[in-house]
Amino acid sequence: MHVKISHRFVYSYSKPVQLGPHRLCLMPRSIGFQKLIQHKISFNPEPCHKFELLAAGGDQILRARFVGSTDRFEIISEAELITSPPPLLSLCLDEQEPRLPYPIGRLNADLLSNLQGWLPNGQHDPAAVALAQEAIIGSDQHCLTFLQQLLEMIQERVNYTQRHHGPPWPAGRTLRERVGSCRDLAVLMIECCRCIGLPARFVSGYHLVEPKPDRYDLHAWAEVYLPGAGWRGFDPSGIGAVDERYIPLASSSNPELTAAVSGSFSGPPGVVSEFSWQIEAAELSMKQP
């Protein structure tokens, strides 16, 4: 799929403010089955300093600093890329499909941060542990069967809803409320995978659903590391195993580090801010060789 995406952010303030440092995760990946052709970010007002850095997960992050005052802040990210379907997991794993629970000692140490629990003491949420144990029953400890059963159970027990504000809920709350946003369901799946030894991380990006909706929004899903197949995406609030219509921007063991735009401002007492966004996507014809 050959696509162009434009993502526009507009922040308006009732009185002039000073913009603090900002961190942006808006560059689509250019690895594996996603090739970035070009990417551009424009600002109004322009930063006095901006610099790129490579995040711990390998994604490219932009930091920006500003001087002066403004009552309006605008960011426009424009990307052109080509995506292709990921290879079938059954072919990648062949006869080496991981058996569960997967021994932590067999994993590369770089993956260990993606096994930690979400509770303050680093333990796994008991509700997620119970769900994972239920999903593993009948899977004969086969990884792909477990993942399919886990996806089905999450979709049966939690109704998807949009929720634009606030951090992801813990797994226990999502199961208790029986409703959750895409990021809530992603965290639930991540926690279930981690507690049986499968590294998992949070992903923020775009899902170019069909038919085209009236309005696109940022989306969140999970990536699970499968020995022999690497990081692979799964969307418990969508189709399950992700395809070429999913475009990741950033991934991390900590969801807060995947925010498209994060920053601060300071101003006079009583200043009020408003935020709006617009995401446009256009599919282009693939050039013939």
Image (cartoon, helix red, strand yellow):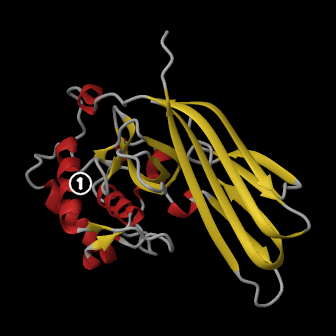
| Residue visible at 21% across and 65% down in the picture | 131
| Residue visible at 89% across and 55% down in the picture | 48
Residue at the farthest front position: 214
What is the three-letter code of the residue carrying label 1? Leu
Front-lying residue, 130 or 182: 182
Residue hosting label 1: 151
Q: Position of residue 134 (x, y in %)?
A: 14, 62
Residue at the farthest top position: 289
| Residue visible at 22% across and 43% down in the picture | 143
Image height of 4 relative to 77, above or below: above
Q: Position of residue 171 (x, y in %)?
A: 33, 70
Q: Is residue 5 left or right of residue 107?
A: right
Q: Position of residue 140 (x, y in %)?
A: 10, 46
**Residue 180 visible in rendering:** yes
Q: Is residue 111 left or right of residue 146?
A: right
Local secondary structure at mark 1: helix
Number of other residues with Cα within 10 Å of mark 1, as a class: few under 14, some 14 to 19, many 20 or more? many
Q: Is residue 80 left or right of residue 255?
A: right
Can you say which quadrant of the picture contains the N terminus?
top left
Image height of 159 relative to 210, above or below: below
What is the number of callouts on the image?
Answer: 1
Front-lying residue, 41 or 22: 41
Front-lying residue, 161 or 197: 161
| Residue visible at 51% across and 61% down in the picture | 254
When asked about the image quadrant of residue 92, the answer is top left
Q: Position of residue 169 (x, y in %)?
A: 40, 73
